[in-house]
Amino acid sequence: MSGGKGYDVIIMGAGAAGLMCAAAAGQRGRRVLVIDHAPEPGKKILISGGGRCNFTNIDSAPDRYLSENPHFARSALSRYTPQDFLELVERHGIAWHEKTLGQLFCDGSARQIVAMLLDECARGGAEVACGVTIGAIDHADGLFRLATSRGEAAAPALVIATGGPSIPKMGATGFAYEVARRFGLKVVQPRPALVPLTLSAEEALFRDLSGVSTPVVARCGKAAFREAALFTHRGLSGPAVLQISSYWRHGEAIGIDFLPDRKGDWLLAAKRERPKAGLRAILDEALPHRLAVALGERLGIAGDLGTIADRVLAQAQARLADWQLVPSGSEGFAKAEVTAGGISTAGLSSRTMEAKAVPGLYAIGEAVDVTGWLGGYNFQWAWASASAAGQAV
């Protein structure tokens, strides 16, 4: 690691965004140093997608990202698309497949994506230094100077790519926010996103369903997702719940439609067609048995359908279509796949990711207040924001 003016760009963080930015900048002739405190690069990439890396989503669009400025991501996403990344993957001979809902995965291992990014960094001559801790960061005379465990490094451009605090067991911290605040950038309160939700003791009936999974529509505010929900010993998880968790705020209710395929007055129709059937038997045909029993108990409707007033059945039907639950909390950053919030986009250029008030300082990837849906969207933001900065530094 050389000191002084040995580099044009220093990138803090050797994850998806940092490596992508290093490759883009290096291949433009910039002298690039990437620093990471982890012993190896791309640790979160390696665990993603069950070890197969859900590296992008072909349906990526700005409306699938949360931010205080919902338009901020538009520029970068439009200039580096899922197709652009897919072409890079194919150029490296990495076999891939599409799962549900536009999600693209490696056929083999997530290690192929890390190797590809390191190859691209090497093509541009970027130096990747892992196991390096950063101390003081100063900015004077047009240079950012970093005191590190391997000596001083300096460059006219500094990129914050250290992500958010989600999954701390992987070494994740709030370092990005400390650096941002050091240079006067605002930080939108970080919170866990794509995270399981917990239920209180009053909802213990549902916590007793641990391991049961069923397709639902989960709603919070104007957001709605149709995917599977999974009951856990602490509350709710599964793709539908992880998605809605990004929109949920403490104290709010979420609504669950347990029978999204049942339309119209299906319960009244069942009463006419099978008056001697009980409600639990009807639910048992459409839902996992343990869930059907639990919902039946909560609804408290006994007897044959033919003996139950239409009004009572209509109320039961409405409740099954929008079952209100108020989560007690979430499982926190330890179980969150990503962080919502982060470095405020108000202080950044949407075209270059450069800080408006601090020339030469950039922020990309999960460190920024842009959070994608589950299913490859956050990787696409990493690639797109990194490409934008890599073309600008």
Image (cartoon, helix red, strand yellow):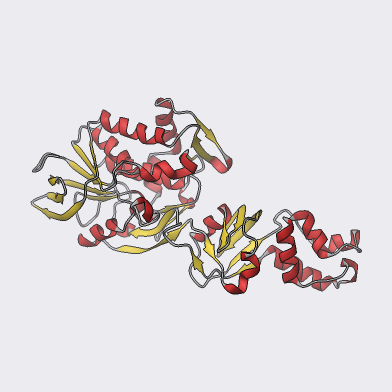
Q: From the top left corner, tell me how far across and down residue 313 is, in percent.
A: 80, 69
Quadrant including the N terminus: top left
Q: Nearer the viewer, residue 59 or 196?
A: 196
Quadrant including the C terminus: top left
Q: Is residue 216 above or below residue 208?
A: above
Q: Is 305 left, or right, of 106 in this rendering?
A: right
Q: From the top left corner, tell me how far across and down residue 37 is, in percent.
A: 26, 48
When asked about the image quadrant of residue 93, the answer is top left
Q: Is residue 29 visible?
A: yes
Q: Is 228 left, or right, of 177 in this rendering?
A: right
- What's the residue at 35%, 42% (across, down)? 42
Q: Is residue 380 visible?
A: no
Give the tally of numbered discs: 0
Q: From the top left corner, tell me how far across and down residue 10 is, in percent.
A: 20, 44
Q: Is residue 381 above or below residue 165?
A: above
- What's the residue at 20%, 52% (across, down)? 134
Q: From the top left corner, tell me how far across and down residue 250 is, in percent.
A: 48, 70
When asked about the image quadrant of residue 87, the answer is top left
Q: Is residue 86 above or below residue 346?
A: above
Q: Is 264 left, or right, of 389 in this rendering?
A: right
- What's the residue at 32%, 39% (across, down)? 20
